[in-house]
Image (spheres, rainbow, N blue to C red):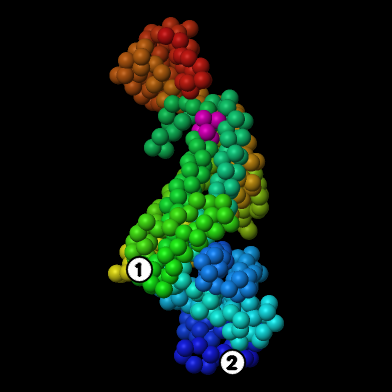
Amino acid sequence: MRTEVDSMGPMDVAAEALYGASTQRAVLNFPISGRPLPPAFIHGLGLTKFACAGANEELGLLPPEKSRLIRQAAREMAEGRLDAHFPVDVFQTGSGTSTNTNANEVIANRASQLAGEPVGSKRPVHPNDDVNLCQSSNDIIPTALHLSVALALQQSLRPALVHLQAVLEDRAQAFAGVVKIGRTHLMDATPLTLGQEFSGYATQAAKGVGRVDKAVAALRELAVGGTAVGTGINCHPQFAARVVRILNEETGLDFAEARNHFEAQAARDDAVEAAGHLATIAGSLTKIANDIRLLGSGPRSGLAELRLPATQPGSSIMPGKVNPVMSEMLVQVCLYVQGLTHTVVACGREGQFELNATLPLIAFALHEAVRLLAGGARAFADACVAGIEADEARCQELVQRSLMLVTALTPHIGYDRAAAVAKEALASGKTLREVVLEQGLMDATKLDLALDPLGMTGLRGTPA
């Protein structure tokens, strides 16, 4: 152990730890969940500290050597090399001050190591005076929140949804000629192709990509420069603009300084908006996963229009049973994600006066949602969608048995007669064709053309 000192006095800290007294106090104060903030958030905070040091050096507020040491330590933090030194629980002070202080102490102590000074000496870099220069937890934690979530969306979730879209489009093309019965209200409807059905799923995934882009755009404004309450006290007036420029150079994204720093710190509406896009994506993926497992239900007593890849045994008691486990996985992921996004919505209401006091929980919920959606979508694409096959004979059987082909007869015999034909076919067990010919409603040639299932899909014009 070693002894470090903060404004509240001495505190024993593990000798190998790069954090200091204030972080250790937080560890002791918050033994709640055993879960620290997500690594992606910590990495974003490290990148923020890197940019802040660079801006302070440009403004002549930080000597070049101190800036170099801070930036090197912050870069290591952003790259994940210092993750082990961030133990503070997600359920902590609502501003995230404990985590900001944790970062300041780790960067200062790592700078001491790089300079050949003892850890805890605060030489040559001081955690507050140097690492936290021109900053407050109240603007830096929201900045790291927006920065890190936007990066996670761009680098993790977006590629996963693009991949899912491509795999769904591949299946849509493969199934382009497979005519099947449509269903509305879970009841038989008019035919379409399995390719058309899958094209709808692919478009849902494509719109999910667009929603990721909208979520990134919602997080574009950064709170840096507002310091304690949005007034920018103890902050150089050019500091925020320089920090934003450096972050844009580092990330390739298009961040901007907040138009109104009071809103940027008091409210978390941008995070709530991003959560809304994630909730919508979760809803889309749930619909796709549920449809696919229903279409693959069976193999003999269900719809069985699809043959899903067999990934593992489905039962400990029923030999040979195979379940749609990848769909079930994705549905569970999406249910959890929608719970996380609802948490963010509730957190958005907790902005009393000049600060929202649920920042760590918002950061955790958004990062967890992004991580799980990305992992779930990619696994579902690879282990399920890519290997789906169509049972064309089963699709054809269900089309031929469907009474809703009668819809195509309405222009020829009218709605009421068509309805009567459908009822008679259902009651007698006869086909639509048999009933229409028995009643002399249409000649055989015209009837066969009208009842052609492919003509009802829009892929081939139905003859007049």
Q: In which quarter of the image is the C terminus?
A: top left
Figure check: 32 above or below 426: below
In the foreground, 305 or 337 = 337
Residue pictured at 46% horizontal, 68% vertical? 140
Amino acid type, label 1: Thr
Q: Is 425 situated left or right of 180 in this image?
A: left
Amino acid carrying mark 2 in the image: Thr
Are there few (<14), some (14-19), or many (20+) residues within 10 Å of tag 1? few
Circle 2 is placed at which residue position?
3
Magenta region, residue range: 195-199
Vertically, is 212 above or below 143?
above
Q: Mark 1 points at which residue?
A: 231
The image quarter containing residue 104 is bottom right
Drawn side of residue 446 relative to residue 69, left or right: left
Q: Which quadrant would residue 58 be assigned to in this image?
A: bottom right
In the image, residue 161 lies at what x, y percent?
A: 55, 46
Left or right? Give the position of 419 relative to 55. Answer: left
- Residue 359, numbered circle: none
On the image, the x and y values in percent for residue 179 come to 54, 26
Q: Can residue 328 be seen here?
A: no
